[in-house]
């Protein structure tokens, strides 16, 4: 979640180039989509377990800018 959120990969311009046309609210959706894909890549993790894991840590991870908060 943090990697996808802080990397800039979910910037709206990148999303538009990938065919995702939603501008408002796109970033959290992109971050969640990419995090879920990443967790589901584990062959020992079911889709349901991946969704539960992402949801469980979503608020904490999405709102954590460390270590980049020190540079701001």
Image (tube, grey):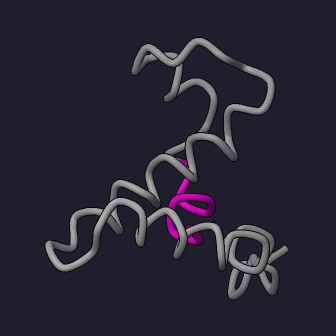
Provide the residue span drawn in magenta. 1-8
Front residue of this view, candidates 23 and 32: 32
Towards the viewer: 56 or 32: 56
Q: Residue at x 64, y 67 (%)?
A: 55
Q: Quadrant of residue 46?
A: bottom left
Judge from the rendering whether residue 48 lies leftward or rightward of residue 7; answer left or right: left
The picture places residue 8, in percent across and down from the top left corner, at 56, 50
Asked where in the image residue 42 lies, by quadrant, the reply is bottom left
Please identify the dominant SS of the magenta region: helix
| Residue 4 horizontal/vertical position (percent) | 52, 59
Residue 49: x, y in percent? 41, 72
Q: Is residue 13 above or below residue 8?
A: above
Could you say where residue 30 lies in the image, as x and y percent from the top left? 56, 41
Is residue 14 positioned above or below 53 on the image?
A: above
Is residue 39 found inside the magenta-colored segment of the image?
no
36 relative to 71 in the view: left or right: left
> Where, by quadrant of the figure, is residue 40 drawn?
bottom left
> Quarter of the image containing the N terminus?
bottom right
Total numbered labels: 0
Instruction: Out of 41 and 50, give the one closest to the viewer.
Output: 50
């Amino acid at each position: 979640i943090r990697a996808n959120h802080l990397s800039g990969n979910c910037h709206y311009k990148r999303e538009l180039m990938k065919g995702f046309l939603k501008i408002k609210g796109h970033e959290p959706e992109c971050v969640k989509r990419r995090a879920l894909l990443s967790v589901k890549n584990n062959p020992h993790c079911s889709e349901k377990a991946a969704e539960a894991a992402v949801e469980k840590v979503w608020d904490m991870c999405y709102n954590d800018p460390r270590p980049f908060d020190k540079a701001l």
